[in-house]
Amino acid sequence: MSDKPVVIGVAGGTGSGKTTVTRSIIQQFTDKTILMMEQDYYYKDQSHLPFEERLKTNYDHPLAFDNDLLIEHVQKLIQKESVEKPVYDYKIHTRSEDVIPVDSKDVIILEGIMVLEDPRLRDLMDIKVFVDTDADVRIVRRLLRDIKERGRTIDSVIEQYINVVRPMHLQFVEPTKRYADIIIPEGGQNHVAIDLMASKIKTIIQEKGN
């Protein structure tokens, strides 16, 4: 079998549990054979814009992502090269000066709301997963996250969800479900689906070792 890393895409709406699914899968591996690459780290650098303009950023639109850089990095990782993953600072709404050195591994999981939206990214994937969770659960999770982690108010989160997040989800995220090889309902609570994914990855790794 090819020595090329296996690339798995895990998409789904905001708060769907795709990060929980990915981390639950990774926890089943102790030999550090899986690399998680979060699309959230690849928002475009906006340091050239005034802060007031950065505040208008629609983080739920495909154009917010620097997919060119993400694709370049994934291609390098597939070639077993190391990359420097960017870090995005939500407080200043642009890329931080920090980077995270990343080494390639046997399995690369690309996780993010839009990872199945760009056909160039899909073409790099061996397995495509969509985490499908009810909208009411997703909005509650986003509400809690944005208040706790990003210092947002309840009113601002709800207003953003109604005016931006929901319409962007319906326009750009939900349609990518049709590209998925596997659909996981209820996100991180679906332990059967997570175990099946982990078993599949273990089989792939074993085959690569033979």
Image (spheres, helix red, strand yellow):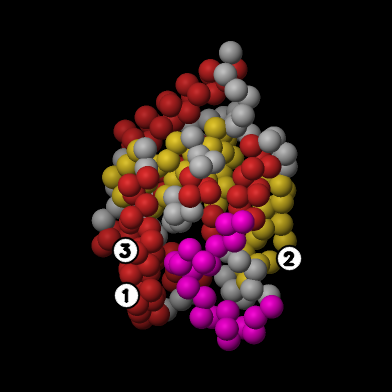
The kind of residue on which mark 1 rests is Ile
Disc 3 residue type (three-letter): Leu
Say which of 17 and 44 sits in front. 44
Instruction: Classify 10 Å Cα crowding around label 1: few (below 14), some (14-19), many (20 and above).
Output: few
In the image, the segment drawn in magenta is: 48-68
Given residues 37 and 48, the one toward you in this image is 48
Looking at the image, is 144 positioned above or below residue 134?
A: below
Question: Which type of secondary structure does the marked residue at label 3 adopt?
Answer: helix
Task: Please report whichever mark, 3 or 1, sits nearer to the chain's N-terminal start.
Answer: 1
Q: Is residue 13 left or right of residue 91?
A: left
| Residue 148 located left or right of residue 13 | right
Q: Residue at x 51, y 80 (%)?
A: 56
Q: Which residue matches tag 2?
A: 97
Q: Earlier in the sequence, mark 1 or mark 2?
A: 2
Please determine whether, in this image, residue 147 is positioned above or below residue 103.
below
- Picture disc at residue 170: 3
- Residue 162: assigned label: 1
